[in-house]
Image (cartoon, rainbow, N blue to C red):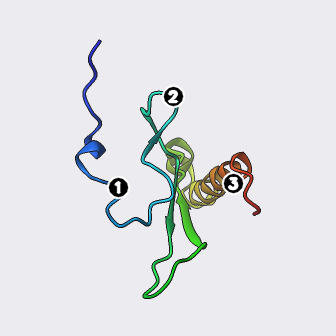
Amino acid sequence: MRRALPHTSAFDSTVGAGTVLMPFGGRRQMTPSQVMAALIPLERGGTGTCSVMSYGFEPYRSEADPYRGAYCSVAESLAKLVAWARLNRIAV
């Protein structure tokens, strides 16, 4: 069975050499990443520090109560970051 390439395959995520995670993971490199991590750019030398980002959104909860939905979205994105860090054995 042939599969179409994901739309992100048109872009080279390694151009800036600051990418820590590739956009797709898993055995067949087809699972989209839930977390973004990139090295902090410096004018000179290298760095071991990176910035991380995730997302979270619950549309049904946000529809019922926007403030509670926003609160839960932040909690969900933080939970993804903690899960990723623990999976990769990174201190949080």
Residue 10 location (% of width, % of height): 22, 46
Disc count in the image?
3
- For residue 27, side relative to residue 15 (left or right): right
Residue 41, by quadrant, is bottom left
* Comparing labels 3 and 1, the label whose residue is closer to the camera: 1
Q: Amino acid at mark 3?
A: Ala
As measured in the structure, the alpha-carbon distance from the residue carrying label 1 to the one carrying label 2 is: 19 Å
Residue 88 location (% of width, % of height): 69, 49
Q: Secondary structure at mark 1?
A: loop
Query: Which of disc 3 and disc 2 is earlier in sequence?
Result: 2
Outermost residue, top direction? 1
Residue 29 location (% of width, % of height): 44, 34
Task: State the residue in front, 71 or 51.
Answer: 51
Task: State the residue in front, 14 or 34.
Answer: 14
Quadrant where the image shows the C terminus: bottom right
Q: Are marks 3 and 1 in contact (CB under 8 Å)?
A: no
Residue 18 location (% of width, % of height): 44, 66
The structure residue drawn at horizontal position 60% and vertical position 73%, both measured from the top left corner, is 49
* Comparing labels 2 and 3, the label whose residue is closer to the camera: 2
Query: Which of disc 1 and disc 3 is earlier in sequence?
Result: 1
Check disc 2 and report the residue beneath it: 27
As measured in the structure, the alpha-carbon distance from the residue carrying label 3 to the one carrying label 1 is: 21 Å
Q: Residues within 10 Å of mark 3 (few under 14, many from 20)?
A: some
Query: Which of disc 2 and disc 1 is earlier in sequence?
Result: 1
Check disc 1 and report the residue beneath it: 13
Check disc 3 and report the residue beneath it: 85
Q: Are marks 2 and 3 in contact (CB under 8 Å)?
A: no
- The image's mark for residue 52 is none
Q: Amino acid at mark 1?
A: Ser
The structure residue drawn at horizontal position 42% and vertical position 47%, both measured from the top left corner, is 23
Placement of 4 over or under 84, stated as above or below: above
Q: Amino acid at mark 2?
A: Arg
